[in-house]
Image (tube, helix red, strand yellow):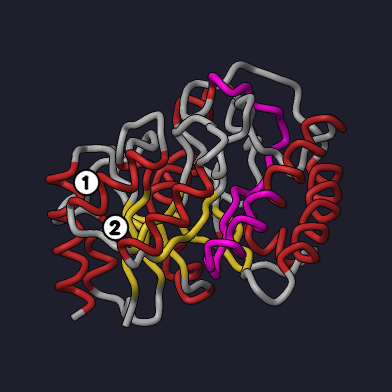
Amino acid sequence: MGQIYISTACIKSSSIKESVLKLVSAGFKNIELSGGTKFYPDYKDDLLKMKKEYGLNYLVHNYFPPPKVPFVINLASQNKEIFQKSIDQCKSAIKLSKELEGEKYGVHAGFLIDIKANEIGRKLSRSSLSKRNDAIKKFEEGWLQLIEEAGQEVTLYLENNVFSMTNSKTYSNNNPFLLTDYESYLELSDKLDFTILLDFAHLQVSCNSLGLEFEREVEKLFPLTNYIHLSDNDGSHDQNKGLQNHGQIMNFIRNNDLNGKTITIEIYSGMDQVIYDYNKISEILN
């Protein structure tokens, strides 16, 4: 049977301890630690104490643990400082995964631009793009370092990026992201050994921006992974809304086997919506 995790990004809090406790009080034990909280020295001790006290299962994701100074991870960056900071951040996350007994760690695939911290999830300013081959080569260099760090204890996943309609206009349909669809999955998997963390909402938006059919793309990518992220949106931008009953994402989930998949709910519409969607997916699994 699949396991359902709830992302701490569902809770708006500056402290990871507070986010976890709010999820615990709502009855959740499987928690994915994600971005959005601030660094403080005792965060690891707090997580270990809560794990023991409440019998929690953790997964570490992308921007956790929070860096002391916010920045955007880019494992394909041509900027030496950003590339090294990205490697160090991901290695910290892998080490933390081992300490918390989290078996999976997912990080976003790289970009052909360096995104500013205040532009995450927003309209990007226009920058010149790195050459795609150079970006992939750099990404491969970084990925091999992370595989070595992970060893046998942590399985690494690459999350598909989201190419919004707004950013499609800014970049005149010239996609500045790696891994947004099946074709770019093949492009990367030709060079690297990785498993995709399939974010359904990211794929839905990217498909609309790239003029692709979501159903066709998800049918190709879904069998390649055992780890998925779920939320919904208007098809143009990543909005982390609750799942729409008759939307493309929900229709696919109802008609496909989720057994054996790790599923993370990543919804920012309040705890009632999180609980509602958790129950809905649990029902499908059972």
Residue 77 located left or right of residue 182: right
Q: Which residues are magenta?
A: 92-118
The verdict on residue 224 being magenta is no
* 97 within the magenta span: yes
Q: Quadrant of the N terminus?
A: bottom left
Residue 172 percent location from the top left of the image? 59, 26
Q: Secondary structure at mark 1?
A: loop
- The numbered disc on residue 242 is 1
Position of residue 166 relative to residue 142, above or below, is: above
Task: Kindly indicate the quadrant of the structure image that contains residue 270.
Answer: top left
SS for dot 2: helix
Is 23 in front, or is 195? 23
Count of picture labels: 2
> Three-letter amino acid code at disc 2?
Ile
Between the C-alphas of marks 1 and 2, the distance is 11 Å
Other-residue count near label 1 (Cα within 10 Å), few / some / many at <14 / 14–19 / ≥20: many
Residue found 54% across the figure and 44% down from its top: 64
Q: Which residue is mark 2?
A: 249
Give x and y (percent) for residue 27. Answer: 19, 59
Whether 105 is drawn above or below 142: the answer is below
| Residue farthest to the top, as pictured | 125
Q: Quadrant of the C terminus?
A: bottom left
Q: Position of residue 89 (x, y in %)?
A: 69, 43
In this rendering, does residue 211 appear at all? no
- Quadrant for residue 55, please give it: bottom left
User: As drawn, is 187 to the left or to the right of 68?
Assistant: right
Viewer-side residue, 234 vs 35: 35
